[in-house]
Image: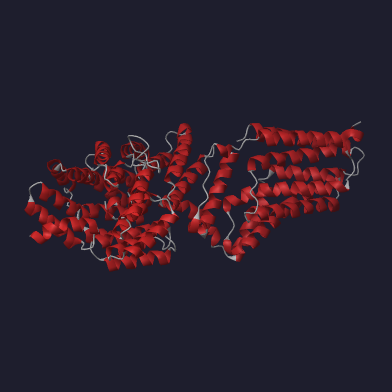
Amino acid sequence: MLKKYGYIILIGFTAVFFVLILVFSKDPADKIPGFKDRIGNISTTSEWLNSKKAMQGLLDNIAKNPKDYKSMLTLVEDYIQEARVTGEYAYYDKASLELLDKVLKNEPRNFDALTLKALIYLSQHHFSDALVVGKEAQAINPYNAFIYGILDDANLELGRYDSAVKMADKMTSIRPDLRSYARISYLREIYGDIPGAISAIKLAVSSGYPGLEQTEWARMILGHLYEIDGKIDSAQLTYQKALAERPDYPFAIAGLGRIEKEKGNYAEAIKYFEKAKDMIVEYSFKDELTDLYRLNNEPSKGDKSAVDVVDELGGNLGDESQSIHGHYADKELAYAYLKTNPADLDKALKHALIEYDRRPDNIDVCEAVAWVRYKRGDYAQADTLINKALRTHSRNPILLCQAGLIKVKAGEAANGVALIKSAIQQDPYFDINLRKEAAPYISAN
Amino acid sequence: MMIEENKGVLITRKKWIAFLLAVLAFAHVASAHVVVNNLSKTDAISMYLQLGYTHILPLGFDHILFILSLFLLNPKLKPVIWQATAFTVAHTITLGLSMYGLISPPSHIIEPIISLSIMYVALENVITDKLRPTRVAVVFMFGLIHGMGFASALSQLGLPKNQFFLSLITFNVGVELGQLTIILAAWFLVGKWFSHKPWYRKRIVIPVSIIIASIALFWTIQRVFFPG
């Protein structure tokens, strides 16, 4: 019988199992969020092909062994990088946290997992959470430079600048590299040492491999520092260099757009920003376009762009913002509501205060609340907050100019005018709208 | 910082933080692929030959059982090598297609089918004592499936851009060498001495095939219902 019906039984048996496989075999990777295909120019780079293969390989590892935590952590690292390149923070941050929670559920003292979780919290602007998790990781391994970087960032964002400096020094003493130099640069900038910040970020750039995203991002910071130092030609060259090293880098394209804006070439600037906007999800490109359309006598486009920015930041989603990136974005929303037509001053204040409740010592947050107060005519309250924002002696021309305007209105005309003049002296090309607003006070003195 | 999103400065907070910390992420990608991409021709041949070989011996227990199942039915070198070659040609095709990104088979389907294919070949050894021409066709078809499984393993390392085709072929040669090693070892250990014995089928082919089929059945169930 076996000889007669053997093949029929065998084939039937195999067919049944084949169907069972198709019906019941579940992809373990279904529970593991995969990566998203890139779109546009960034989808054609060899870097993407490499990254895609790496991520797929890791997903396959996890599919075969759902307890392969090493692959999960490596995948999180890839997702963090992918979010940077694509702007898809909402997706990749959520995916990364899911993966990290799986690892930490089984290995609660996994240093890498804790470090990466703190990193994601930073990315989401959940700075207090980042500090808690970062300290937990630091207790496990106090000799790791990376964790001091996280603690530096968390302290800095919470406005604890002295602690941030200590953490940055510790990080640099353990490992002087692109990351630590970049932090030193940022802290120097906060404390008003622009030449020192430029020196440090130059070290960061020279520590990186030309063309890599993080190296070119460091170059973006260098360009920005040149801008706020009034050296727009150097800034332009820096952005051009970045584009040569990393073609189609959207932030370098936007940098060139900003230079054109500073030169008053608004139509040209719009072209750059529209190109950058089409490449990645980045609300700030739209925010720039809002100003540029208006400067270029296209007010309806400007108004629409302002509404788009609010939408993108999650302004219509609820009381406490979670932008489409999944981040707290209340400070950004506060500014965004100042640009809608008409400006929504109540919502601007509401979001500014939400952010202020989270981190009342951060100078950027103090500046944001002060500026909203100023726009509402609450000059005394604005003055108190802007003093807090000025306490690190930052030389940021926008901060200086806003502080000057607030002080003039608050009755400190001499101090105010001096601040406005120092802003212009620092950078004659900063935001044209702000300069126009300040112009009467300069000419009157 | 200089984060003045509302005022014309594009550097946003999230980018800044991510920039400072995501070098770590890049390091992984770089280590996984930049190194591979910089391989010389000699290094690529050596590396992928070794990778292909070790994917069979000692790492590919399921592939070892598949080859042994092919061997057991007719333990003569020529027909077994023919089957193994058909198998290699087939898996070269799907491996190449997968690595070029033309097909992307889901591993959770492919892996159980690979074990099912082992079970099929082992059970066929039980129900027949003759090597039928259809066997080569079946082996070829299963080779296509196994190639997709190899692709999953190979994709973890990637292939160097400058030596893509060479590395792919070398990997397959390594696989083929691994298979030949199994066949030769099985022939020296079993085929040469016992294949002509009247009890060969009853005492070796059928019991060993049943054991292999049982293991393959276990794997199939495990991979479908209890993955990981």
Residue A121: x, y in percent?
A: 37, 40
**Nearest the eye: A138 or A64:** A64
Say left or right for A427 vs B195.
left
Q: Residue at x 71, y 47 (%)?
A: B146
Vertical arrangement, residue A33 with respect to residue A44, above or below = above
- The quadrant holding residue A154 is top left
On the image, the x and y values in percent for residue A350 come to 26, 37
Numbered marks: total: 0
Question: Where's residue A319, x and y in %?
Answer: 32, 34
Q: Nearer the viewer, residue A63 or B190?
A: A63
Coordinates of residue A196 in the picture (x, y in percent): 23, 59
Looking at the image, residue A346 lies above or below residue A445: above
- What residue do we see at 71% from left, 46% from top? B145
Please say if B135 is above or below A443. above
Occupied quadrant, residue A93? top left
Q: Is residue A418 visible?
A: yes
Please report the residue visible at 29 percent of the width from the left and 59 percent of the height from the top: A295
**Could you tell whether B57 is left or right of A301 in the image?**
right
The answer to whether any part of residue B10 appears in the image is: no
